[in-house]
Image (cartoon, rainbow, N blue to C red):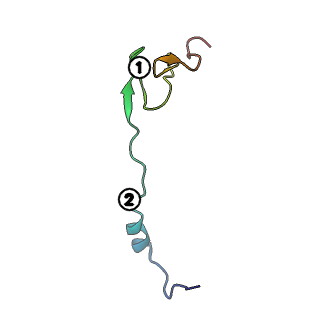
Amino acid sequence: MAHPKRKTSKARRDKRRTHKNLGEATLTECPNCGAVHQRHRACAECGYYRGRQVIKAASEV
């Protein structure tokens, strides 16, 4: 197996990793209660996802 002849510098390593970062989460408004929540997740305020209740709401617990 091949081995590197020289150590990869921190600058070269970091230049390669510039695109490996997380973007901001996309937020959307809940059509049921109007609260802002993360897309493809159940709303924490009302517990609805895609028009039906899938979890108990924070206010019900």
**Cβ atoms under marks 1 and 2 closer than 8 Å:** no
Q: Which image quarter holds the N terminus? A: bottom right
Q: Is the residue 52 above or below the residue 41 in the image?
A: above
Image coordinates for residue 13, horizontal then vertical, percent: 44, 71
Residue found 49% across the figure and 82% down from its top? 7
What SS does tag 1 mark? loop
- Furthest toward the bottom, the residue is 5
Name which quarter of the figure residue 38 lies in. Answer: top left
Q: Earlier in the sequence, mark 1 or mark 2?
A: 2
Q: Which residue is mark 1?
A: 35
- Furthest toward the top, the residue is 60
- Of 14 and 57, nearer the camera is 57
Q: Which residue is mark 2?
A: 19
What SS does tag 2 mark? loop
- Of 40 and 60, nearer the camera is 40
Alpha-carbon distance for marks 1 and 2?
32 Å
Q: Which image quarter holds the C terminus? A: top right
Residue found 50% across the figure and 17% down from its top? 52
Image coordinates for residue 10, horizontal then vertical, percent: 44, 72
Image coordinates for residue 2, horizontal then vertical, percent: 55, 86
Q: Is the residue 38 above or below the residue 5 in the image?
A: above
Three-letter code for the amino acid on which mark 1 is drawn: Ala
* Left or right: 34, with 42 as reference point: left
Q: Is the residue 24 above or below the residue 13 in the image?
A: above
Three-letter code for the amino acid on which mark 2 is drawn: His
